[in-house]
Image (cartoon, helix red, strand yellow):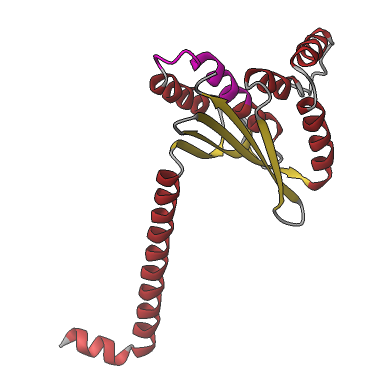
C-alpha cells in the first residue's frame, strides 16, 4: 500500500525514474552490442591483442612481454619486437593527443598485433594536427622509395648527426621499421575533426622470408 501511495502521489518523479532506468538499460545494451562487434572484429581479423589509450612505459613493457610469450620460439621475434617498440614509442612521443598529469605527458593512440597464415601485422594509429600530415606523408614516401642500401646509409647518417633535445630520434624510427620489414610498410591519413587527422601506420612481416 505504501508503494502504491508513493507512486500515485509522485507520478512525475516515477515517470522520470522510469525514463532514466530505460535510458540506462538502453545505454548498457548499446555498450554490450558494441563490445560484441569489437569481439567479432578482433576474431575475424586474427587480432592477438589491441590497446587503445595513453601509452606509458609500464604498458609498453606488458605488451612487449605478450609478444615475447607468443613468439618465444620464433626466429623473427627480435625483428617483430623491435618494430613493435618503435611504433609504440612513436605514439608515446609524437601523438598530438596527450594525457597530461603532474608527472607525465604521454601520447594517446591505438596499436594492434595480428597474425595470419602468411604474415604478422603490427598497426598503430594516433591523432596528428592537420598541418603536420603533409610533412609526415612526404617523409614516409621518401623512406619507402629508398633501396636497402640507401636506407642503411641514411640511417647511419641520421645516427651520426647531433640530435635536437626535443626530437627524441624523430625520423630514425620510420627508417628502422622500413629496414626491419624490408619495406613492407603502408599508411593511411583520415580526417578526424576540425583539428586532427588520424594517422594509421601498417607494418607487415612475412613468415616465410
Residue 140: tell me if it is visible. Answer: yes
Residue 100: tell me if it is visible. Answer: no
Q: Residue furthest bottom?
A: 8
Q: Nearer the viewer, residue 183 or 7?
A: 183
Work out whether 173 lies above or below 156.
below
Picture coordinates of residue 28 (x, y %)?
38, 63
Work out whether 27 lies above or below 174.
below
The image quarter containing residue 188 is top right
What predominant SS class does the magenta segment belong to?
helix
The magenta stretch is 72-86
Residue at position x 81%, y 40% in the image:
132
Magenta region includes residue 83: yes
Picture coordinates of residue 129 (x, y %)?
77, 45
The image quarter containing residue 5 is bottom left
Magenta region includes residue 130: no
Q: For this view, does 58 lie left or right of residue 169?
A: left
Residue at position x 40%, y 16% in the image:
72
Q: For this view, does 6 lie left or right of residue 48?
A: left
Residue at position x 42%, y 20% in the image:
71
Picture coordinates of residue 191 (x, y %)?
72, 53
Picture coordinates of residue 21 (x, y %)?
36, 73
Residue at position x 15%, y 88% in the image:
1
Number of numbered labels in the structure image: 0
Amino acid at each position: 500500500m505504501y508503494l502504491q501511495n508513493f507512486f500515485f502521489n509522485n507520478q512525475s518523479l516515477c515517470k522520470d525514474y522510469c525514463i532514466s532506468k530505460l535510458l540506462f538499460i538502453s545505454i548498457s545494451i548499446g555498450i554490450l552490442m558494441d563490445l560484441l562487434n569489437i569481439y567479432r572484429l578482433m576474431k575475424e581479423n586474427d587480432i592477438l591483442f589491441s590497446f587503445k589509450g595513453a601509452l606509458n612505459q609500464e604498458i609498453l613493457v606488458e605488451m612487449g612481454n605478450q609478444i615475447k610469450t607468443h613468439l618465444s620460439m620464433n626466429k623473427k621475434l627480435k625483428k617483430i619486437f623491435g618494430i613493435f617498440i618503435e611504433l609504440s614509442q612513436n605514439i608515446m612521443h609524437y601523438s598530438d593527443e596527450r594525457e597530461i598529469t603532474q608527472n607525465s605527458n604521454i601520447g594517446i593512440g591505438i596499436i594492434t598485433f595480428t597474425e595470419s597464415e602468411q604474415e604478422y601485422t603490427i598497426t598503430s594509429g594516433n591523432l596528428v594536427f592537420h598541418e603536420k600530415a603533409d610533412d609526415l606523408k612526404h617523409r614516409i614516401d621518401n623512406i619507402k622509395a629508398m633501396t636497402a642500401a640507401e636506407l642503411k646509409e641514411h640511417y647511419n647518417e641520421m645516427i651520426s648527426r647531433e640530435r635536437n633535445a626535443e626530437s627524441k630520434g624523430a625520423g630514425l624510427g620510420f627508417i628502422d621499421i622500413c629496414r626491419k620489414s624490408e619495406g613492407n610498410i603502408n599508411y593511411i591519413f583520415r580526417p578526424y575533426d576540425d583539428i586532427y587527422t588520424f594517422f594509421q601506420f601498417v607494418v607487415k612481416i612475412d613468415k616465410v622470408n
